[in-house]
Each structure stands twice: as C-alpha cells, then as structure tokens.
Amino acid sequence: MVIKIGVLELQGGYALHHNLLKKIGLNSLPVKSGDDLKQSNGLIIPGGESTTLSLLMTKYNLRESIIKFAKHNPVLGTCAGLILMSKDVDDQRVDPLGLFDLSISRNAYGRQIYSSKKRIFFQYDQAKEIELHSTFIRAPKINYIGENINIVARHGNLPVAIFSKNLLGLSFHPEIDGIDIFHKMMFDKTSKFYYKNVN
Ligand code: GLN
C-alpha cells in the first residue's frame, strides 16, 4: 500500500507542505472532503486564517471527519493549524476541533509586519536538542497546556511545539524554511526522528 499524507486544502499555505513531503520522499494528496481523508494515512492542517478555516471546515463537513481521523492517525498542524487543533481560542469566531487540551491566543507575536525568523530549540529525545531558525507569521501563543502533552520545542521560555501521542502542533512554519524534521517526525517511518522512536 502506498502511504499518502493528506494536506488540508481549504485555504492558506498548503502548497509548501506538498513540496516538503515530496522532498522527503512521501506522497501527498489534497484533502477537501471526508472522502479525501479516507484515502490519507496522515493529515497536515496548514497555516492560513483560522477564522476562515474554521468556517470552511464546517461548510465542507470536515469537522467530524477530522476529529475521528485524529484519534488514530498522525496529524500535524502549523500556526492556524495549531489554533484549530486546540480546545480553547481567544476568538469567538474560531470554533476549534478540540484535539489538544490547549488554550491559545491568536496573533500574539504581533502583526504581519513583525513576521520574523526566530531561534527555537527542538528537543527530540531526553538528551538531544537541535537549534533551528523558523518563521513566525502572526503566530499563536500557547497559554495553557493540559495533561500528557509534551513541549518539544521552545523559543526562549515559550512553548512553540507541542506533541501528544499522534498529534503535533507548531506555532511556526517549518515548511517555509525547508525544515523537514517535523514532517519526518510525524510521517516518515524510516526517519530517526519518527515519533514512535522518540522516548
Ligand atoms: N494569525 C493567523 C490566525 O489566527 C495564523 C497565521 C498563520 O497561520 N501564519 O489564523
């Protein structure tokens, strides 16, 4: 069976995720419906505008399918994707999926013109830390983190990547910087970064 990673294509920055998956040798497919999701072995919820994505998820009947899918399949959310994966958002216009017990503030790193590459440290096992520089665009802040959720990357003291079981949420955009560690972690079973290898 060919493994295919679905990339949610409702709005936002999905194209670069397809490119990155291709670069690491994985097949991808666009997800615009529950049927597309059935063909997928994993899902990426890209960055974009979380208010719009929230409306479109409802419009295209994807809400329940994604919640069900996320119970047993790897899901990676970047930026607006992280906002949608959370449980609580400081904006009534966003109806999040509640995959993660997190509370999130939108746009908490400042406006679009303050977009920047920031230094982060990714801890991929107890002993090893990797320094990366990745892009934050009107990025969300993670305020509250529930039980059994691990912080896997930090910018200064702030958590910017959180991981639980088969779910990974990032405040930033590794796909813009060509950073493939997180995609490998979630979807590439041959990689040393693959999450089942992480203790
Ligand atoms: N600020 C956006 C939102 O709240 C997220 C930005 C992004 O995905 N880069 O939807």
Image (tube, helix red, strand yellow):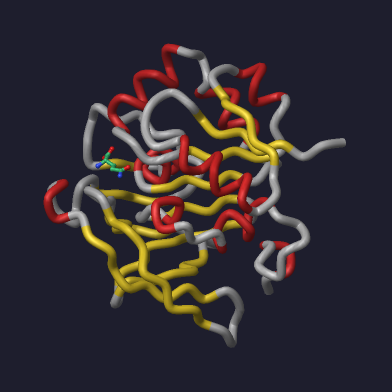
Reply above or below: 146 against 20.
below
Front position in the image: 186 or 90: 186
Q: Residue 65's image quarter?
A: top right
Q: Quadrant of the C terminus?
A: bottom right
Q: Residue 170's image quarter?
A: bottom left
Reply above or below: 163 against 132.
above
Q: Residue at x 71, y 24 (%)?
A: 38
Q: Residue furthest bottom?
A: 127
Q: Position of residue 96 (x, y in %)?
A: 39, 34
Q: Quadrant of ligand 1?
A: top left
Q: Is residue 38 left or right of residue 8?
A: right
Reply above or below: 118 against 110.
below
Q: Residue at x 44, y 39 (%)?
A: 46
Q: Residue at x 41, y 58 (%)?
A: 177
Reply above or below: 196 against 107.
below
Q: Position of residue 71 (x, y in %)?
A: 65, 40
Q: Quadrant of the N terminus?
A: top right
Q: Is residue 121 left or right of residue 191?
A: left
Front position in the image: 104 or 77: 77
Q: Is residue 40 left or right of residue 55?
A: right
Q: Position of residue 173 (x, y in %)?
A: 39, 53
Q: Residue 193's image quarter?
A: bottom right
Q: Residue furthest right?
A: 1
| Picture mark count | 0
Front position in the image: 154 or 187: 187
Q: Residue at x 63, y 58 (%)?
A: 184
Q: Is residue 193 left or right of residue 110?
A: right
Q: Position of residue 87 (x, y in %)?
A: 40, 42
